[in-house]
Amino acid sequence: MKIVSTGNSEGLSSKISSILGIPLARVNHRRFADTELYVRIEEQLNEAIVVGSTYPDSGIIDILLTADAAQNAGAKKKVLLVPYFGYARQDAMFQQYEAVSARVLSELFLERFDKIFVVNMHSPEGMAFLGNKGKEIRAESVIGERVKEDGNDVVISPDDGFREEGENISKVAGLESIYLNKKRVSDTKVEITIPEGFSVKGKVVALTDDMISTGGTILESSKVLKQNGAKAINVYCVHGLFVSGTSRYAGFVDSISTTDTVDGPFSKMTVSDIVASSLREYFGH
Ligand code: R5P
């Protein structure tokens, strides 16, 4: 069995490989002059664990080509680990005749893989598209440990969507948790209010979310929490995309910690141990 990394997941693949003692396959990834991707696995395979996120978009084609290369290299069994499953927020038709991207990607992967692991899919609806082949790996325990180490007073989630996860994080950290009221005005703008009767005055807040994309949610939440007297804001999320860069957070938050599902400057936590134990359980060793 070999671990086959796509181009965007080499760091995490190496960590999982050393924890499990499963070697990395030699893969030749390169771009043609017109930027099209070329993938060749440079050895024969029996079973393959392909690791690849769907962000940025090129990750999707990388996973599809890597699946084909693994098949052509002889892999009888192909397992996919998607550390960050992008396109998952469109998990339904919110307006008539929209494409449901979470389903489209799921179908592409279901055709090619025997099992699909995903770290913190955006919603249960998205996960449902993967049916019995899908298995979600939850990173709340990893975040909870870090929240505890950092000496926070309370766990706050920016909206109802991350409420349950926020509660699970708070249990690991031994803290109370609440969630804010969020209204999305546009792709980049949200309105946030603190629930009545809850005071953040003088508190060190662990602000937790599944992902930071533009950062609008985190920045607006931090602004409102600081205006209401929070002493410090430490931000924690599973997937840090930071599509609008990282400089905009300075002065608004005191620290940012993300996992390594998307490798970036704030990837201070690793999901490699929880991923390794899920893979171990699946393969029965
Ligand atoms: C929303 O449902 C998610 O949980 C995140 O809060 C959101 O996707 C973050 O996006 P942004 O960083 O662009 O506000």
Image (tube, rainbow, N blue to C red):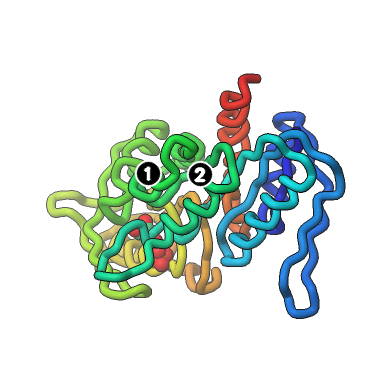
Residue 91's place in the image compared with 81, above or below, is below
Check the image and name the residue furthest to the bottom.
34
Asked whether residue 113 is in view, the answer is yes
* Three-letter residue code for mark 2: Val
- x 52%, y 70%: residue: 243
Give the SS element for disc 1. Answer: helix
Which of the numbered marks, if any, corresponds to residue 183? none
Residue on which the image places disc 2: 119
Mark 2 packing: few (<14 Cα in 10 Å), some, or many (20+)? many
User: Viewer-proximal residue, 66 or 274?
Assistant: 66
Q: Position of residue 194 (x, y in %)?
A: 21, 57
Give the SS element for disc 2. Answer: strand
Q: Position of residue 220 (x, y in %)?
A: 33, 67
Q: Position of residue 139 (x, y in %)?
A: 48, 40
Dividing the image into 4 quarters, which one contains the C terminus?
Answer: top right
Residue on which the image places disc 1: 128
Q: Earlier in the sequence, mark 2 or mark 1?
A: 2
Q: Position of residue 149 (x, y in %)?
A: 50, 38
- x 78%, y 60%: residue: 29
Residue 72's place in the image compared with 181, above or below, is above
- x 72%, y 72%: residue: 36
User: Viewer-proximal residue, 164 or 127?
Assistant: 127
* Three-letter residue code for mark 1: Ala
